[in-house]
Amino acid sequence: MYANQQAEILAFIDLLAETGSNYRMEAMEDLYLDDLGFLVLTPEGSIARFSKEEMLGEFRSRRDAGEPPLSTEKRVLHIEVQDDQATAVLYRRMSGLADPAFYELRLRKVDGRWMVAGETVLPWPDPGAAGGFLPPRTKPMPPDGQAGDRSGM
């Protein structure tokens, strides 16, 4: 990925966190595409999908009720860019009273600027307890297999 694309996306993520955490609704409107899909894992293990209007409505309601600003705490873990689309994976914590979350931001570049096309929010895993998503091998690798250590796989 080109350094300027990464810098643009990192700056956009900073702007997104700052704007949303301070309930700047008019500015938030301009950061999200109208066809936004905001996905959240529910306590029942299903996915709830919220529209742009529903997601912004929650932030507006918090602002109007006088809720304090949210934390901007985040760590960008990975960014992938393909042409005018990008995916960013982050650690995000909105407050010391909220659980940390695993965020996937799906971004699209429109008229020269990055915008959020979708977000997926999942509970932050315990890295010490997280194993690979594949079970351990039960057979040795074939001699011509060149796979290196893929303990995360």
Image: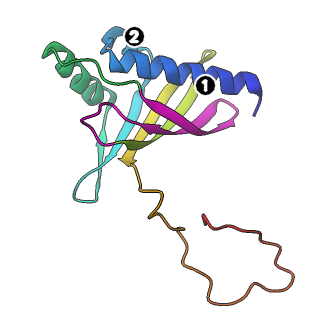
Q: Quadrant of the N terminus?
A: top right
Horizontal arrangement in the rendering, residue 112 relative to residue 130 (left or right):
right
| Residues at marks 1 and 2, CA–CA distance in whole angstroms | 17 Å
Crowding near pointer 2: few (<14 within 10 Å), some, many (20+)?
few
Residue 84: quadrant of the picture = top right
Q: In front here: 42 or 74?
A: 74
Kindly identify the residue that appears in the image at 43 percent across and 22 percent down: 17
**Secondary structure of the residue carrying numbered label 2:** helix
Q: Is residue 111 magenta?
A: no
**Secondary structure of the residue carrying numbered label 1:** helix
Instruction: Residue 7: give x, y in percent of width and height.
Output: 67, 22
- Residue type at tag 1: Ile
Task: Give the vertical position of 125 relative to 90 (above or below).
Answer: below
Task: Give the vertical position of 35 relative to 25 (above or below).
Answer: below
Residue 33: quadrant of the picture = top left
Give the magenta range. 73-99
Where residue 67 is drawn, which disc sits there? none
Instruction: Residue 145: give x, y in percent of width and height.
Output: 82, 78
Residue hosting label 1? 9
Q: Quadrant of the C terminus?
A: bottom right
- Residue type at tag 2: Ala
Residue hosting label 2? 27
